[in-house]
Image (cartoon, rainbow, N blue to C red):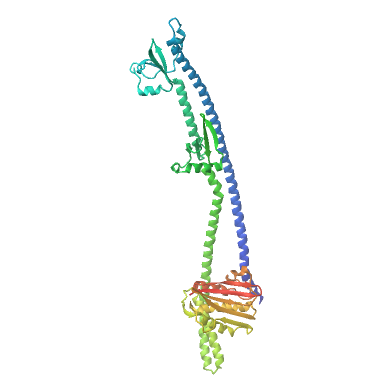
Amino acid sequence: MNKPRLSQRRVTNIYEQKKTWKRWLFLMALFIVGVSLWYTNLLVKNIARDERNKITTWANAIQQRVNLVNYTDDFFDQIRVEERKRVEILAEATEKMVEAGEDENILFYLSIISNNTSIPVILADPDGKIKEARNVDFNTDSVRRFTPELLKEFSVYPPLKLDYYSGNLVYFYYKDSKLFSELKVVLDDLVESFFKEVVNNSASVPVIITDSSRSNLVAWGQIDTTRLKEAGYVSHLVNEMSKYNEPIEIVIADQKRYIYYQDSFLLTQLRYFPYIQLAIIGIFLLVSYLLFSIARRSEQNQVWVGLAKETAHQLGTPLSSMMAWVEYLKSRDVGEGTIEELEKDVNRLNTVAERFSKIGSVANLKPENLVEVVYNSVDYLKTRTSQKVNFVIRPERKTVIPAYLNAPLFDWVIENLVKNAVDAMAGQGTLTLEITEDDKRIYLDISDTGKGMSKKQFSTVFKPGYTSKTRGWGLGLSLTRRIITENHNGKIFVKSSAAGKGTTFRIILKK
């Protein structure tokens, strides 16, 4: 006698064990995910540190290159000063030679002028006719007069006006020497190459270089050039870059510049990689759980349908035999009361077989008076239930509340809920069935005055195999939910429950 009860208890505890397994599996999954994220985050931090060191090295290299360029610029300034002095000496020597008297020695001035091998000079009359030229890059035999281009080239410095032979004026034109011009080109190339090297950096970081106003771009690199023309984009970019790194202020070729830079795209990706990984793992686990749940539910459905149909098939043979025995007893003058009760039980068994045969099939719903169906079900159960149970049904029997039902299946729902309620009250108490409605739905509340249940049991009671009784297999409420949700497109749930006060189940049907 104890073996069946022990196996029933094992079935009862299966969901407690399942919860324990789920908790352990969940903790193991959290541990694996946590270790994976920790290790990934560690790798990301190491790579990010290397990337940051690379950027810092790049920024320091920029500062050193700025110092080199500025040193070169200072050196060129010194050459510029020396070249300017030479030009001034040459111009002064020419002027002194022209102004020298007949008895004055002009050999010194001639020596200065003749030693000029780099400064381009031109002597021309007021009409622009070239009288003498030296160190120029044009043919003096073919070019005898100032052209507009030539005049523009030699107008960098104002010409000296010299008086030749009592009122005959000549103009002394000059410009920077070839050496100084070449050095200036070298310096400009050096500054330009510096900007190119900054924006085309090996650290692959987005860079912009602005002027002293911090609003006008001088150069840029690793930037979406299609957006540079958008209004306010440059100022927005400057503000964003300032949040990440302090701009590098440089003074190059006597002009102040600001270098703004941002973390590289790789570093940005690495920063968000652990969160993306966590999201992907979460989505994968969620999808896997849903797929396994669907597969498990489908397998359970197949087992339920097969079991139900096999049960209906097994009941068919003894039912036919029992119907024949009822007819036989009628011919033997057995009491009418006995025959009537036997017929009720045979009809009930026939109804049970019909219920099982309909599991897994599309239910044929017909318009029924829900109040009448409930009263009929309770009338049958009253005679087979303890007399200490007080049944209360609202509203009155004459009330009509139409609903689309499959009467045999819905009668099974009422039977299961009533039997559970009676067991919960230990065969003594009040069982209330109340039907209400609104514009769209019909509500059936079944309340008992039994021992009640905890909130964590609200959803568990509908699981197959769950039961709090020492006998029974925990299938009644599971079948009840399937009939309501799948066959009647409704809902059933525990509306309320309190320890020692009872439980209320609610069924919701669409009108």
What's the residue at 62%, 60% (across, down)?
24
- Say which quarter of the image contains residue 21: bottom right
- Residue 283 appears in the rendering: yes
The percent coordinates of residue 452 (x first, y second) are 64, 73
Quarter of the picture containing the N terminus is bottom right
Residue extending furthest bottom?
333
* Residue shown at 62% from the left, 61% from the top: 23
Q: Observer-nearest residue: 461 or 301?
A: 461
Say above or below: 406 vs 98: below
Q: Height in image: 18 above or below 220?
A: below
Q: Position of residue 321 (x, y in %)?
A: 52, 85
Instruction: Return the residue nearer the eye: 120 or 165.
Output: 165
Kindly identify the residue that appears in the image at 60 percent across and 62 percent down: 22
Question: How many labels were placed on the picture?
Answer: 0
Tell which of 168 and 241 is nearer to you.
168
Q: Is residue 313 visible?
A: no
Q: Quadrant of residue 103?
A: top left
Q: Nearer the viewer, residue 335 or 55?
A: 55
Image coordinates for residue 419, horizontal then vertical, percent: 59, 79
- Direction from residue 341 to residue 130 in the image, left or right: left
Residue reaching furthest to the top: 103
Q: Quadrant of residue 174?
A: top left
Left or right: 232 with respect to 29? left
Left or right of 487 on screen, residue 28: right
